[in-house]
């Protein structure tokens, strides 16, 4: 498979290469991993394509600061011996003079296994070769669900495992070897290997940390969807609440509740800035019933992206006062799923998160707001449980909270070894010297922030069962640090709390920890919108919580047991532990 070796001999060293010299098909072919390097994989050297990008602008990227880069995109295909499949991988390579002996693996979002150029370009900006892939699903723009079923009733298990963990692993192992060959890294020269991803990308990253303990030196992981069965059915919970209570609130009414929550809970951290930094204190001190009777008014909208009045489908003008029925819907959602015996099945979003899953649709014919079933949640019932090639549920007739519990149980058992990525024993990763920075927006309306807290606490309790809470919290921070982002939405800043900062440079701090031993006591963050755009802020390390003294100017990271307790749930509907 490795051809054109004479070119390698003609180049004295990779550092002397220009980007133009590196970015040729012949040089890329000569740098491919050798035949037999990865047992069971055959690389098609004739599939190599190289493309140069110059002055590529990274602007408004959630996870990397603005800059411009030059890069070479090297892509190729490989097959699994005996499968007759085709998998495509692509690697963005920095200019040789900017290469910092780093490789960055990346993941996807939703049901996509990659994030396109957005993350690999950031990898180039930190001196890394950045890799992504298509998982064997057809091309880089094909989602996993498109190839999940071979036919109704028949799971394509090879693709299920590729999406679950195998594809990212293969892309990483092949990419690290390609990187070493491209830059003629001699034996003994350290190639630092990193991962960055959020949401599904966060789940992807944890699949690597948990299974392939010695492949990554560090991982920056945001809002992971790792408790997959619980998380996906959670998307249906708000719909079942509305259906059960027989009330389908206008979006503007629910946003009035959110806005009132933000206003009331904003100052609880000692600083009034439009950001709810202490959703735990909000749970302890704010009564959502206080919003009953508040007026709301939203103009008609032609629709658009995102959640809230004016998003999605066109909507009429909405005017009224917050009703007791809407508050009942909101409170039931915030309480999380309970079965019909009152036992806790799962938790929900923090107060101040928007009720995105409760979004309703307007029926012009009847003039009524109606149920709008979450397609993401529905698909995991139809396609992943019933094995029908469909992503929609026609209705929720007969669906109860016990039904949701049953669906979670079925998904959990069926996909525990592929998609359910919440293994709590990270001993091998810790012993290998790996580091994790894990962050989650407190006002996330897609994946509850409590999901990340529960996993961190699970790892802490499983790995250090004989230590006290404070001792084990200190011990786990030697390799795994969690940060809750005040006001943060799902994998980014929050338009409803625009003064909240987002940790755009978590990769830089991770690199400093891995390569220089400087563990982050505070996570750096930057305000990306509104009047305070560009302002730098700091985020406290869990389990410490932010509080502002000095008239709201001095950040203190405090230990508050009552607040910590609000994040801990007894999921007593299950006999199996929910890590």
Image (cartoon, helix red, strand yellow):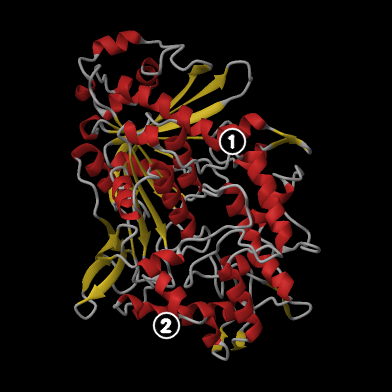
Give the image location of residue 247, x and y in percent: 70, 77
The mark found on residue 417 in the picture is: 1
Give the image location of residue 163, x and y in percent: 56, 37
Q: Is residue 4 left or right of residue 206?
A: left
- Circle nearer the viewer, 1 or 2: 1
| Residue occupying image coordinates x 26% and y 46% | 508
Q: In the picture, which quadrant includes the N terminus?
A: top left
Q: Are marks 1 and 2 in contact (CB under 8 Å)?
A: no
Residue at the limit of the structure toward the front, as seen here: 466
Q: Is residue 364 left or right of residue 487?
A: right
Would you identify the image quadrant in which residue 280 lies? bottom left
The mark found on residue 461 in the picture is: none
Would you identify the image quadrant in which residue 144 lies? top right
Q: Could you classify mark 2 by the number of other residues whose Cα lies within 10 Å: few (under 14), some (14-19), or many (20 or more)? A: many
In primary-sequence order, the first of circles 1 and 2 is 2
Towards the viewer: 67 or 231:
231
From what the image shows, is residue 9 above or below residue 233? above
Q: Could you classify mark 1 by the number of other residues whose Cα lies within 10 Å: few (under 14), some (14-19), or many (20 or more)? A: few
Towards the viewer: 80 or 560:
560
How far is disc 1 from disc 2 in space, using C-alphas? 43 Å
Give the image location of residue 460, x and y in percent: 39, 47
| Residue occupying image coordinates x 40% and y 74% | 281
Tell me, yes or no, if residue 130 can be seen here.
no
From what the image shows, is residue 80 above or below residue 323? above
Would you identify the image quadrant in which residue 430 lies? top left
| Residue occupying image coordinates x 58% and y 25% | 86
Give the image location of residue 497, x and y in percent: 40, 72
Find disc 2 in the rendering and name its residue: 264
Tell me, yes or no, if residue 527 can be seen here.
yes
Q: Secondary structure at mark 1?
A: loop
């Amino acid at each position: 498979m490795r051809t054109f070796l004479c070119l390698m001999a003609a180049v004295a060293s990779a550092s002397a290469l220009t980007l133009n010299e590196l970015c040729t098909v012949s040089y890329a072919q000569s740098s491919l991993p050798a035949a037999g390097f990865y047992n069971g994989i055959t690389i098609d050297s004739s599939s190599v394509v190289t493309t140069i990008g110059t002055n590529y602008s990274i602007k408004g990227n959630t996870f990397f600061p603005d800059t411009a880069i030059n890069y070479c995109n090297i892509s190729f295909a490989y097959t699994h011996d005996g499968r007759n499949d085709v998998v495509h991988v692509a690697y963005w390579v920095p200019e040789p003079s900017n290469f910092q002996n780093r490789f960055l693996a990346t993941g996807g979002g939703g049901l996509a296994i990659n994030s396109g150029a957005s993350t690999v370009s950031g990898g180039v900006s930190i001196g890394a070769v950045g890799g992504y892939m298509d998982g064997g699903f057809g091309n880089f723009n094909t989602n996993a669900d498109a190839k999940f079923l071979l036919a109704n009733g028949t799971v394509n298990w090879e693709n299920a495992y590729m999406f679950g963990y195998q594809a990212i692993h293969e892309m990483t192992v092949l990419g690290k070897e390609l990187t070493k060959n491209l830059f003629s890294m001699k034996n003994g020269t350290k190639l630092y290997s990193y991962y960055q991803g959020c949401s599904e990308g966060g789940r992807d990253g944890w699949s690597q940390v948990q299974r392939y303990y010695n492949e990554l030196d560090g991982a920056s992981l945001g809002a992971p969807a790792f408790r997959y069965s619980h998380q996906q059915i959670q998307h249906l919970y708000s719909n079942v609440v509305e259906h059960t209570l027989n009330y389908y609130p206008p979006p503007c009414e629910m946003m009035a509740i959110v806005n009132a929550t933000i206003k009331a809970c904003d100052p609880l951290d000692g600083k009034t800035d439009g950001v709810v930094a202490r959703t735990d204190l909000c749970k302890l001190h704010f009564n959502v019933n206080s919003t009953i009777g508040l007026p709301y008014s939203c103009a008609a909208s032609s629709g658009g992206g995102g959640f809230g009045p004016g998003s999605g489908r066109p909507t009429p003008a909405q005017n009224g006062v917050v009703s007791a029925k809407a508050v009942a819907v909101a409170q039931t959602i915030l309480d999380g799923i309970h079965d019909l015996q009152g036992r806790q099945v799962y938790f929900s979003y923090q107060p101040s998160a928007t009720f995105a899953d409760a979004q309703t649709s307007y029926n012009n014919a009847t003039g009524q707001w109606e149920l709008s079933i979450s397609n993401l949640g529905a698909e995991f019932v139809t396609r992943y449980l019933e094995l029908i090639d469909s992503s929609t549920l026609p209705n929720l007739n007969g669906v109860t909270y016990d039904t949701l519990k049953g669906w979670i149980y079925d998904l959990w058992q069926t996909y525990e070894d592929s998609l359910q990525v919440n293994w709590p024993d990270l001993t091998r990763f810790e012993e290998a010297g790996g580091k994790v920075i894990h962050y989650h927006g407190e006002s996330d309306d897609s994946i509850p922030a409590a999901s990340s807290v529960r996993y961190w606490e699970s790892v802490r309790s499983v790995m250090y069962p004989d230590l006290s809470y404070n001792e084990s919290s200190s011990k786990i921070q030697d390799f795994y640090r969690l940060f809750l982002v005040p006001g943060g939405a799902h994998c980014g800043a929050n338009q409803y709390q625009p003064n909240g900062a987002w940790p755009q440079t978590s990769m830089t701090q991770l690199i400093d920890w891995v390569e220089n031993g400087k563990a982050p006591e505070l996570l750096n963050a930057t305000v990306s919108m509104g009047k305070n755009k560009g302002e730098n802020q700091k985020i406290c390390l869990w389990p410490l919580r932010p509080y502002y003294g000095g008239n709201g100017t001095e950040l203190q990271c405090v230990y508050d047991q009552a607040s910590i307790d609000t994040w801990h749930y007894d999921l007593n509907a299950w006999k199996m532990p929910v890590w």
